[in-house]
Image (spheres, coloured by chain):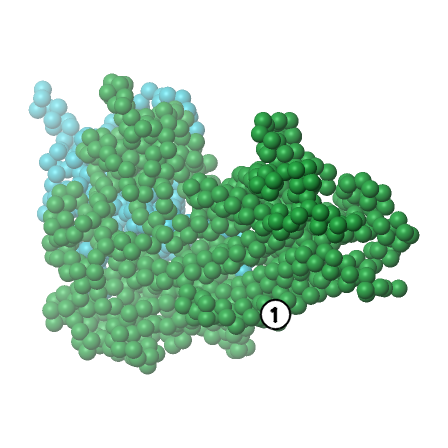
Chain colours: A cyan, B green
C-alpha cells in the first residue's frame, strides 16, 4: 500500500488541536474595524455622525467566514447612509461568544457611549445546550444595563437548531419575546429570517450566512434600526427642550 | 582465461580487507532487506490504524442530505459489488431522563448496519456492538449516565422517542475525528431515526456516508469519481488517508520518516561498500603493478578483479540474506514486548528480491571507480608510493552522474513524489558539496599549522602523507556520520513534537466560558489544581504603523494576522515557554513606555515569524474597538510542542484586567470526579461548557505510543547498522596506515610514541568529521523538520556533543584496533613479509 507524501507533509498535531479549540470553540475571524486596510497613513480626520450603533453579537455579527465589509453591520451602515441616516455602525461581534460573555462586556460597550445597541447573542449558548433560563437572565440583565445607561436596545430574536429537540427549541425561542416584553425593548422576531436553513444563503457549515445572507439579515434588521433612530431623535429633542 | 588460484591467493593475501568488504555488503543487505520488510508491515499496520480512525475507506461529509447524483453513484458501486456503504447521522440533541427531570446535551450518532467498517466499538459488557444496538435501544457513554443519573435498562427521551439504554460504550474507533465534543456520545440505531423526529427544516445534521471499498487499490479511484460528481463546497469526499484529521499529518510524517531511514540506509550502505572496496583494491595495487610490469593485460587484471568482487559480493549478499532471516526469527523475541502485536516482522520475498537487486546495483556502481583506478595503474606504482588516479575526469564525472541518477531514482521511488524526491536529492548534493568544501578548507588550514610537539606534528603530517586518503576518509566518514546524526536528530524532534505531547499529566478536560466573577466559585467546585487562562478577544490593527492587509493575510496558508486573537495576561512564563529575546517578559522600561501611552507585550516567536515582528516594534491592537498601543518587549518560544494552550500575545495584568474577558481552564481529573464536577457546574455555574477529551487523548496517546516504539526501533536499528558499516570502513582505511607504524619503529620510535601519533591523527580526523557531520546534520534535520514535517526544531546541542564525543572515541578506538597487531610486532617481521 502506498502513501502519498505531499510537500507540506506535516503539521504539528498540537497546533492543530489548539487551532481546533480556538477556531472552533472560541473562533475568531475578521470583524469590521476602522483602520482601513490599505492605508498606512495616519487615520484621516474622524467623520462626524449623527449617532453610533454598536452591533453587539457573536460570529453571526462578526461575519465569520465572510469579509468584514460583507458582514451585516457594514451592509446596514451602507443602507442607512443611502437612506439618509448618517449613522455609524460599529461591528462589536465576537465569534464564539455566549450570552454570559456578552453580559460580561456590557460595561465596556456602554463606555463607548453608543446611542443604539443591536443585541444579538445566545446562539452559542443554545448550541452548547446551556439551560435557557441562563440565557434569559443574561440577555435580560444586559438589556437592563444598556437601558439604564440610556442606550436604545434592539434585541435580535433567535431560534435554535431543531435537532436539539422540541422542548429545548421552544423554550429557547420563547426567551427573546419574553425579555423584550419584560425590558420593553424593540424585538426583531427572528434575526435569521429567510436565511436560516437555506443552503444557498449559508456557508457549508450550515450556520453562518453567506454575503447574500448577510444582506438579507441587514434588511431584516433595518426597519427596527430606523425605529430606534427615530425614537432616539425624539428622545434627543425632548431632552433638548427640557434643557432649554 | 580465468585463473581462480590467482583470485583466491589475492583474497587470502588481503583477507582482512576482503572480510571487511564482505561484512559491509552483508550488513548493507541485512539493513536494506530487514528495514524494507519491516517497514512494509509497519506501514500496513499504520494504515490500518488510519482506517480505524475513520472507520471507513471513503468518507463523504455534508450538512445536507446527499445530492441525488452522489447517491446514485454510491448505489452503483454497491450494485457492482465494489463497495459497501453506511450512513451515519451525527448531531447534538438534548437527552432527558424524564423520571429525574434531568437533561443533558448529547452528541448523537445514528448509525446504519456496517458501522464501523474498521475498528471496533467496545462495550462495557464485552458484547458485540452490532448485536446490542437494535431498534428501540441506545448505547451511551458512561458520562451520559453520570450526568442523567441513569443506568443501563432505563429509558431516555431523545427528540420524540423513548429509547432504552442497552449498554455503555468504552471505546469508539473514530472518536478523535470529532475531537471537541460538547456532550457525551449516544449511539442510536438508524431504524429509530424517524421516531426521533429531529431532522427537520432548521436542523444541523452531519451527514456522513461511510464507504468500505472491497479492493483497497481502488479507494483513490472511487473517491476521485465521487468527488467529481459531488456538489462543491458542501459535499466533501475524503479517503481515510487524506481526511483532515489531527492524526493524518502525524501518520504522514512517520511514514515519511520510515522512507527517509530507507534512503539514508541505502546511502550508508553505498558509502560503506565503496570505502571497503576502495581499501581492498588499494591493498592490491602493489600486486597489480607487478602484474602489469610482467605483461598482464588490463583485460586480464580487470576481469579477475571483477570476478573477485563478484565472488566476495555474492558471499556478502548470501551472508546478509541469511542474517536477515536469522534476525527475523529472533527479532520478535527481542522486540516482542516493545513492538505492537499488529506489526509482524516478516520479510517478504519481494523485499528480498528488491534487496538483492539493490545490493548488486550498489556493489556494481561503487566498484566502478576503484576498478578504473586499477585499470589506469602504472607499473611504476610499485616504486612510487603514490596513489593511482581514477583516470579521466570524464569517466569520473560519468560515474558520479550515474550514481546520482541511480540514487535520485531510488529516492523518488521511495518518496513516491518526483518534486520532493528531486528537492531531497538536491539538498543532499548541496550538503555533500558543502561538506567537501569545508573539508578542503580545513585541510588547507591544518596543512599550514606546524605544532611544536613532535607527536602532534607527525600526526598533522600523517594526514598529508602520500597514499593517505585523508580527504576521502573525512568526506565519506562525515557524510555517513551526518546521515546517522540526522536520523537521530529528526527522530528526537518527531518524538518531542508528537509523543511528548502526551505526558501523563495532560489535561483531559477543558472548561470554556468561565466569567471572571465565577472564577472563585469555579475553583471551589473543581477542588483540584487547574490552569486558568484569561482570554481577551482582539484584533491586530497595525505593526509599526503598517496596517494589516486583510486580503494578503487571508491568502496565508497557515495562521494569519487578520483573525481575532486571544490575548492574555500574566507575569510569568508557562512551563513550556522560554524567552529567546529579552531578559524578562516586559522589560525594565515599563514606566518610560507608560509615559508614551504604550504598554509592554511579549510575543510568541511563531506569530512574530508570520508578521515579521521584532522586539521594539509597535503593535496596535483593537481590543473590541478600543485601540491599544503595545511595544514588543520580549520574544517567547515554546520548548515542547505539547497539547497545551498557548498565547501569541501576553500582556501585563494591569493592561487588560479591565477589558472584557472570559477564562479558559484545563485540568486533569479522574472520570468519576469529572462527572461530579460537571453535575455541580450544571447546577451552580450552568454557563460553563465542559469538553471532555479524555477518550480522544486515550486513543491518540495509544497510537502515538505505538508509533513511537516503532520509530525508536527503526532508528536504533538503522543507527546500529550504520555504525557497524562506518566502523568497518574506518577499519578498512586504517589498515592501510599500519605501514607507517613500521617506519616509525625502524626510525627508533617507541610503541608509545607510535600510539600517540596514531591516536592524535585519528583524533584530528574524528574531530573534523564529527563537527562537520554535526553541522551538516543540524542543517539537514532543520530543513527536514521545518520544511517537510512542519514541526518546530530543537538542535539538542548537549546530545550533539555526546554524539561527537562518541564519534571521536569510536574512530580512535577502531584506528588503534586496526594497528594494534603491528604495534606489538617487531618491524623486521613486517618488512620480511613485505618483501
Q: Please name whichever residue, B391 or B493, is drawn nearer the observer in this view of the structure.
A: B391
Residue B130: give x, y in percent of width and height: 34, 78
Residue that appears at 69% across and 66% down: B315
> Is residue B295 toward the left or the right of residue B638 in the image?
right
Q: Quadrant of residue B201?
A: bottom left
Residue that appears at 25% across and 41% down: B535
Residue at which label 1 appears: B322
Specify the subunit that label 1 lies on: B
Q: Please name whichever residue, B66 or B770, is drawn nearer the observer in this view of the structure.
A: B770
Q: In the image, is residue B681 above or below residue B572?
A: below
Residue B218: give x, y in percent of width and height: 56, 69
Residue A218: give x, y in percent of width and height: 31, 43
Residue that appears at 61% across and 27% down: B449
Mark 1: few/some/many CA within 10 Å (<14, 14-19, 20+): some
SS class, disc 1: helix
Q: Quadrant of the N terminus of chain B?
A: bottom right
Q: Quadrant of residue A173?
A: bottom left
Whether residue B188 is visible, yes or no, is no
Q: Quadrant of residue B675?
A: bottom left
Picture mark count: 1
Whether residue B754 is visible, yes or no, is yes
Q: Please name whichever residue, B616 or B349, is drawn nearer the observer in this view of the structure.
A: B349
Residue that appears at 83% across and 59% down: B303
Q: Please name whichever residue, B825 or A137, is drawn nearer the observer in this view of the structure.
A: B825
Residue A128: give x, y in percent of width and height: 24, 55
> Is residue B542 toward the left or the right of residue B387 in the image?
left
> Is residue A22 toward the left or the right of residue B239 in the image?
left
Q: In the image, is residue A215 above or below residue A84?
A: below
Amino acid at each position: 500500500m502506498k502513501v502519498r507524501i505531499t510537500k507540506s507533509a506535516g503539521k504539528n498535531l498540537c497546533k492543530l488541536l489548539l487551532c481546533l479549540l480556538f477556531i472552533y470553540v472560541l473562533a475568531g475571524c475578521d470583524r469590521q474595524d476602522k483602520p482601513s486596510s490599505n492605508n498606512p497613513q495616519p487615520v484621516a480626520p474622524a467623520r462626524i455622525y449623527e449617532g453610533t450603533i454598536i452591533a453587539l453579537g457573536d460570529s453571526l455579527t462578526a461575519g465569520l467566514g465572510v469579509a468584514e465589509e460583507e458582514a451585516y453591520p457594514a451592509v446596514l451602515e451602507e443602507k442607512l447612509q443611502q437612506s439618509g441616516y448618517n449613522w455609524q455602525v460599529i461591528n462589536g461581534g465576537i465569534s464564539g461568544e455566549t450570552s454570559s460573555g456578552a453580559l460580561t462586556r456590557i460595561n465596556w460597550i456602554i463606555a463607548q457611549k453608543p446611542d443604539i445597541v443591536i443585541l444579538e447573542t445566545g446562539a452559542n449558548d443554545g448550541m452548547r445546550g446551556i439551560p435557557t433560563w441562563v440565557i434569559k437572565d443574561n440577555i435580560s440583565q444586559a438589556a437592563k444595563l444598556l437601558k439604564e445607561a440610556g442606550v436604545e436596545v434592539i434585541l435580535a430574536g433567535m431560534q435554535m437548531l431543531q435537532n436539539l429537540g422540541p422542548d429545548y427549541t421552544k423554550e429557547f425561542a420563547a426567551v427573546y419575546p419574553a425579555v423584550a416584553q419584560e425590558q420593553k425593548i424593540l424585538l426583531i422576531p427572528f434575526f435569521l429570517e429567510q436565511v436560516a436553513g437555506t443552503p444557498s444563503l449559508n456557508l457549508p457549515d450550515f450556520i453562518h450566512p453567506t454575503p447574500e445572507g448577510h444582506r438579507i439579515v441587514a434588511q431584516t434588521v433595518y426597519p427596527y434600526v430606523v425605529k430606534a433612530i427615530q425614537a432616539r431623535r425624539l428622545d434627543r429633542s425632548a431632552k433638548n427642550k427640557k434643557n432649554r | 582465461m580465468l585463473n581462480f588460484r590467482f583470485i583466491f591467493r589475492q583474497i587470502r593475501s588481503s583477507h582482512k580487507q576482503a572480510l571487511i568488504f564482505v561484512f559491509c555488503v552483508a550488513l548493507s543487505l541485512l539493513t536494506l532487506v530487514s528495514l524494507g520488510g519491516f517497514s512494509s508491515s509497519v506501514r500496513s499496520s499504520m494504515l490500518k490504524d488510519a482506517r480505524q480512525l475513520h472507520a471507513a475507506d471513503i468518507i463523504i461529509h455534508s450538512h445536507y442530505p446527499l445530492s441525488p447524483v452522489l447517491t446514485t453513484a454510491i448505489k452503483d458501486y454497491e450494485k457492482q459489488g465494489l463497495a459497501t456503504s453506511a450512513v451515519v447521522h451525527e448531531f447534538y440533541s438534548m437527552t432527558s431522563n424524564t423520571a429525574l427531570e434531568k437533561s443533558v446535551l448529547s452528541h448523537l450518532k445514528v448509525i446504519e448496519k456496517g458501522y464501523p467498517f474498521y475498528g471496533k466499538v467496545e462495550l462495557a459488557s464485552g458484547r458485540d456492538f452490532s448485536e446490542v444496538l437494535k431498534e428501540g435501544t441506545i448505547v451511551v457513554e458512561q458520562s451520559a449516565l453520570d450526568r442523567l443519573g441513569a443506568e443501563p435498562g432505563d429509558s431516555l427521551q431523545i427528540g420524540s422517542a423513548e429509547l432504552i439504554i442497552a449498554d455503555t460504550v468504552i471505546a469508539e474507533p473514530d472518536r478523535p475525528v470529532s475531537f471537541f465534543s460538547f456532550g457525551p456520545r449516544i449511539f442510536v440505531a438508524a431504524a429509530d431515526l424517524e421516531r426521533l423526529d429531529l431532522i427537520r427544516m432548521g436542523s444541523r445534521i452531519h451527514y456522513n456516508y461511510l464507504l468500505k471499498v472491497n479492493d483497497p487499490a481502488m479507494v483513490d479511484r472511487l473517491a476521485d469519481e465521487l468527488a467529481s460528481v459531488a456538489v462543491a463546497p458542501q459535499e466533501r469526499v475524503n479517503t481515510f488517508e487524506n481526511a483532515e484529521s489531527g492524526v493524518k499529518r502525524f501518520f504522514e510524517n512517520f511514514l515519511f520518516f520510515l522512507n527517509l531511514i530507507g534512503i539514508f540506509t541505502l546511502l550508508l550502505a553505498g558509502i560503506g561498500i565503496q570505502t571497503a572496496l576502495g581499501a581492498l583494491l588499494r591493498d592490491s595495487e602493489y600486486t597489480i603493478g607487478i602484474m602489469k610490469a610482467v605483461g598482464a593485460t588490463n583485460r586480464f587484471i580487470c576481469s579477475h578483479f571483477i570476478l573477485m568482487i563478484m565472488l566476495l559480493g555474492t558471499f556478502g549478499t548470501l551472508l546478509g540474506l541469511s542474517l536477515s532471516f536469522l534476525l527475523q526469527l529472533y527479532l520478535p523475541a527481542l522486540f516482542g514486548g516493545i513492538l505492537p502485536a499488529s506489526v509482524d516482522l516478516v520479510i517478504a520475498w519481494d523485499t528480498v528480491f528488491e534487496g538483492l537487486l539493490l545490493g548488486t546495483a550498489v556493489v556494481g556502481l561503487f566498484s566502478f571507480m576503484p576498478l578504473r583506478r586499477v585499470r589506469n595503474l602504472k607499473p611504476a606504482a610499485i616504486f612510487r608510493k603514490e596513489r593511482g588516479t581514477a583516470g579521466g575526469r570524464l569517466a569520473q564525472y560519468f560515474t558520479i552522474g550515474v550514481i546520482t541518477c541511480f540514487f535520485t531514482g531510488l529516492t523518488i521511488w521511495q518518496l513516491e513524489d518526483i518534486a520532493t524526491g528531486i528537492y531531497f536529492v538536491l539538498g543532499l548534493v548541496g550538503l555533500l558539496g558543502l561538506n567537501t568544501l569545508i573539508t578542503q578548507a580545513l585541510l588547507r588550514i591544518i596543512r599550514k599549522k606546524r605544532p611544536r610537539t613532535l607527536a602532534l606534528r607527525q600526526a598533522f603530517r600523517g594526514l598529508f602523507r602520500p597514499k593517505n586518503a585523508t580527504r576521502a576518509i573525512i568526506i565519506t566518514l562525515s557524510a555517513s556520520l551526518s546521515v546517522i546524526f540526522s536520523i537521530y536528530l529528526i527522530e528526537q524532534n518527531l518524538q518531542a513534537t508528537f509523543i511528548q505531547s502526551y505526558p501523563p499529566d495532560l489535561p483531559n478536560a477543558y472548561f470554556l466560558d468561565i466569567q471572571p466573577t465565577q472564577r472563585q466559585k469555579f475553583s471551589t467546585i473543581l477542588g483540584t489544581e487547574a490552569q486558568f487562562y484569561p482570554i481577551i478577544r482582539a484584533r491586530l490593527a497595525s505593526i509599526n504603523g503598517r496596517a494589516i492587509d486583510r486580503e494578503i493575510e487571508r491568502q496565508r496558508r497557515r495562521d494569519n494576522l487578520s483573525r481575532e486573537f486571544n490575548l492574555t495576561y500574566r507575569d510569568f512564563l508557562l512551563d513550556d515557554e522560554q524567552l529567546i529575546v529579552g531578559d524578562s517578559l516586559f522589560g525594565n522600561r515599563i514606566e518610560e513606555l507608560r509615559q508614551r501611552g504604550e504598554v509592554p507585550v511579549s510575543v510568541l516567536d511563531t506569530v512574530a515569524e508570520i508578521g515579521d515582528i521584532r522586539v521594539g516594534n509597535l503593535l496596535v491592537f483593537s481590543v473590541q474597538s478600543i485601540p491599544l498601543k503595545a511595544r514588543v518587549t520580549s520574544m517567547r518560544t515554546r520548548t515542547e510542542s505539547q497539547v497545551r494552550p498557548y498565547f501569541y500575545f501576553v500582556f501585563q495584568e494591569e493592561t487588560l484586567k479591565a477589558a472584557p474577558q472570559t477564562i479558559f481552564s484545563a485540568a486533569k481529573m479522574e472520570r468519576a470526579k469529572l462527572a461530579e464536577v460537571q453535575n455541580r457546574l450544571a447546577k451552580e455555574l450552568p454557563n460553563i461548557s465542559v469538553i471532555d477529551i479524555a477518550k480522544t487523548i486515550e486513543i491518540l496517546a495509544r497510537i502515538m505510543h505505538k508509533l513511537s516504539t516503532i520509530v525508536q526501533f527503526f532508528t536504533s536499528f538503522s543507527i546500529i547498522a550504520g555504525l557497524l558499516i562506518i566502523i568497518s570502513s574506518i577499519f578498512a582505511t586504517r589498515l592501510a596506515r599500519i605501514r607507517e607504524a613500521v617506519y616509525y619503529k625502524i626510525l627508533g620510535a617507541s610503541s608509545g610514541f607510535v600510539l600517540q601519533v596514531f591516536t592524535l591523527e585519528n583524533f584530528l580526523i574524528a574531530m573534523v568529521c564529527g563537527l562537520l557531520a554535526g553541522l551538516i546534520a543540524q542543517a539537514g534535520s532543520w530543513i527536514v523538520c521545518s520544511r517537510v514535517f512542519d514541526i518546530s526544531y530543537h538542535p539538542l546541542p548537549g546530545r550533539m556533543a555526546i554524539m561527537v564525543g562518541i564519534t571521536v572515541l569510536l574512530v580512535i578506538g577502531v584506528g588503534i584496533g586496526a594497528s594494534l597487531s603491528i604495534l606489538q610486532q617487531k618491524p623486521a617481521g613486517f618488512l620480511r613479509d613485505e618483501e
